[in-house]
Structures are given as C-alpha cells and as structure tokens.
Amino acid sequence: MGFPEAVAFCALVVGLISISGILLDAHNRRLKHREKELELQVRLAEAQGRKGSGEVAQLEQRLRVLERIATDKGSTLAAEIEDLRERADAR
C-alpha cells in the first residue's frame, strides 16, 4: 500500500466516523423529542382524567338526588324539589 492509498484509507475512516457521529446525534435528538411527546401525552391524559373525575362526581351527586326523590314520600319530596329549583335559579 502506497502513500496515496494510505491517505485515502485515513480519509475514509475519518469520514465514516464523522457520518456515524452525525447519525448518532440525530438519533439522540429524535429520542429526546419522542420522550417530550410522551410526557406531553401523559400530562394531557392526566388533565383529562381529572376533568372526567369531576364530571363523574357531579353525575353521582345528581344520581343520589334523583334516587332520594324517587324514594321519598309526600311533603318532603315537594320541599326538596322546590329547594333544588331555588338553587338552580340562584346560579
């Protein structure tokens, strides 16, 4: 192997190392980006879960009121209905 071939071989090795470094850096950036995407998806899911649990609690409260209305008798039922109407009008 002569001098020109040795120089070409060294240039090839340096080029391959450089390309490998560039590809590795691009891969690392892609992984970091994907990690941030997943973190945002988790935050979004948590926020939707909190919102959903609030809606579920409100529906459970309404169901309890309806069950109480369905099982109560007479004057207490009428009084509670009027109380609920007054609260709804106050909002």
Image (cartoon, rainbow, N blue to C red):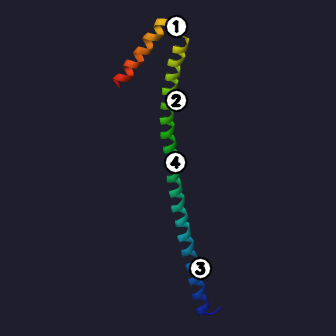
Q: Which-is-in-front pick, marks 1 and 4?
A: 1
Return the mark for residue 90: none
| Dot label at residue 73 | 1
Question: Quick one: label 1, few (<14), some, or many (20+) residues within 10 Å?
Answer: few
Q: Which residue is located at x 42 percent, y 18 percent? A: 84
Tell me the CA gap for discs 4 and 3.
42 Å
The local secondary structure at tag 2 comes to helix
Among the two numbered marks 1 and 4 on one chain, the one whose residue lies closer to the N terminus: 4
Tell me which numbered mark, 3 or 1, is placed earlier along the sequence: 3
Mark closer to the chain start, 2 or 4: 4
Label 3 or label 1, whichever lies nearer to me, is: 1
For the residue labelled by badge 1, is the local secondary structure a helix, a strand or a loop?
A: loop
The residue carrying mark 4 is: 41
- Whole-percent x, y for residue 60 in the image: 52, 24
Which residue type carries mark 3? Val
Residue 16 in percent (x, y) is at 58, 77
Amino acid of disc 4? Gln
User: Front-most of 53 and 63?
Assistant: 63
The alpha-carbon separation of the residues under discs 2 and 4 comes to 22 Å
Residue found at the very far right of the displayed protein: 1
Estimate the spatial distance between the alpha carbons at disc 1 and disc 4, rounded to whole Å.
50 Å
Residue position marked by numbered label 3 in the rendering = 13
Quarter holding the N terminus?
bottom right
What residue sits 47% from the left and 40% below the top? 47
Q: Earlier in the sequence, mark 4 or mark 3?
A: 3
Q: Is residue 32 above or below residue 90?
A: below
What SS does tag 4 mark? helix
Q: Which residue is mark 2?
A: 56
Going from the N terminus, do you reach mark 1 or mark 2 first? 2
Mark 2 or 4: in front is 2
Inspect the image, locate mark 2, and give the three-letter code of the amino acid beneath it.
Answer: Val
Q: Is residue 9 above or below residue 68?
A: below
